[in-house]
């Protein structure tokens, strides 16, 4: 989507890691401008202005003007970026010139609208499968997003990429059969019957041996005194 935004840039005289560090210390980041059958140009830009565009409602699909001091002013798009993994700061950006008279391919987010009948009436669940589709259109026709009404979906029904309403000269690039969202039945939880667990407990009880308590002495065992008396009689 073409926005009335202009980002200023300066040409970088040299390249390399040392030059990139100096550029960042100065509050800028290195960037490369290319495309439209023109030579690539190494420039420096303000990272805050680039991040503001990335975080806008149109995000990476934003077309803005890049004004190079002492050079060209051209519509561009951010096509790639390098981010510091820990702090999340922007380190580098790739910018592509855009010819407003030629069609381009872009990816546009798709959102679902409404509550499916299969959820309200049948107790089902809405599953979102695809959150963006690819289209081809003129730069001035790039939409911010697409909306798909899923309120009529019953369990087993779906909305596909071919159901997304395209306008103007937009052309669907993604496969027409790509599922955007569908209504599905909830999976029943499998609960083991309590009766199945009972035999296990009973078996465990039977396996336990009862405690044996020994009482008294064995009949063939005699006290020491009695044994001595028997010996005396025999003599």
Image (tube, rainbow, N blue to C red):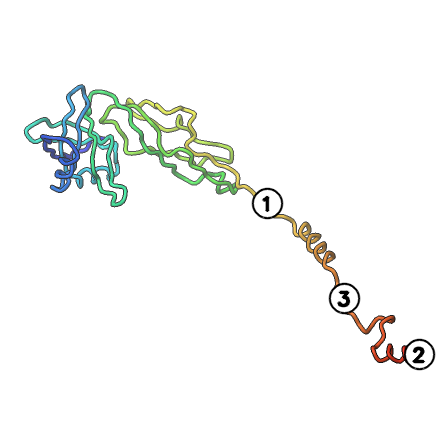
Q: Earlier in the sequence, mark 1 or mark 2?
A: 1
User: Which label lies toward us, 3 or 2?
Assistant: 2
Q: Nearer the viewer, mark 1 or mark 3?
A: 3
In screen coordinates, is 147 left or right of 86?
right
Q: Position of residue 88 (x, y in %)?
A: 25, 43
Q: Residue 108: give its label.
A: none
In the image, what residue occupies the spot 75% across and 63% down? 210
Is disc 1 surrounded by few (<14), some (14 to 19) or many (20+) residues within 10 Å? few
Disc 1 vs disc 2: Cβ atoms closer than 8 Å? no
x and y, in percent, of residue 207 in the image: 73, 56
* Residue 159, quarter of the rendered image: top left
Label 3 crowd bin: few (<14), some (14–19), many (20+), radius 10 Å: few
- Locate residue 216: give its quadrant: bottom right
Residue that carries the numbered disc 1 in the rendered image: 190
Q: Residue 72: horizontal and vertical position, in percent?
A: 10, 26
Kind of element beneath mark 2: loop
> Dot 1 lies on which element?
loop
Tell me how far mark 3 sits from mark 2, CA to CA. 42 Å
Q: Is 58 situated left or right of 227 in this image?
A: left
Disc 2 target residue:
235
Gap in Å between the C-alphas at discs 1 and 3?
44 Å
Q: Quadrant of residue 106?
A: top left
Mark 1–mark 2 Cα distance, whole angstroms, equals 85 Å
Q: Secondary structure at mark 3?
A: loop
**First reached walking from the N terminus: tag 1 or tag 3:** 1
Residue 212, disc: 3
Q: Residue at coordinates 25% horizontally, 36% vertically from top-left?
A: 59
């Amino acid at each position: 989507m073409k926005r009335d935004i202009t980002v200023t840039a300066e040409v970088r005289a040299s390249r390399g890691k040392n030059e990139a560090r100096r550029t960042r210390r100065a509050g800028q980041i290195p960037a490369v401008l290319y495309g439209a059958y023109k030579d690539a140009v190494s420039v420096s830009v303000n990272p805050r202005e680039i991040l503001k565009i990335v975080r806008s409602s149109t995000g990476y699909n934003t077309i803005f003007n890049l004004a190079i001091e002492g050079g060209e002013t051209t519509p561009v798009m951010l096509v790639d970026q390098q981010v510091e993994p820990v702090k999340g700061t922007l380190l580098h950006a790739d910018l592509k010139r855009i010819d407003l008279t030629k069609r381009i391919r872009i990816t546009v987010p798709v959102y679902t609208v409404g509550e499916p009948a299969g959820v309200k009436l049948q107790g089902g669940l809405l599953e979102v499968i695809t959150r963006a589709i690819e289209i081809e259109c003129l730069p001035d026709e790039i939409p911010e997003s697409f909306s798909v009404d899923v309120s009529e979906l019953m369990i087993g029904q779906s909305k596909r990429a071919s159901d997304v309403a395209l306008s103007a000269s937009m052309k669907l690039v993604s496969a027409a059969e790509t599922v955007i969202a569908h209504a599905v039945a909830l999976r029943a939880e499998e609960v083991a019957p309590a009766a199945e667990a009972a035999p296990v407990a009973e078996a465990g009880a039977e396996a336990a041996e009862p405690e044996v308590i020994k009482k008294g002495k064995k009949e063939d065992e005699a006290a020491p005194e009695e044994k001595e008396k028997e010996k005396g009689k025999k003599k």
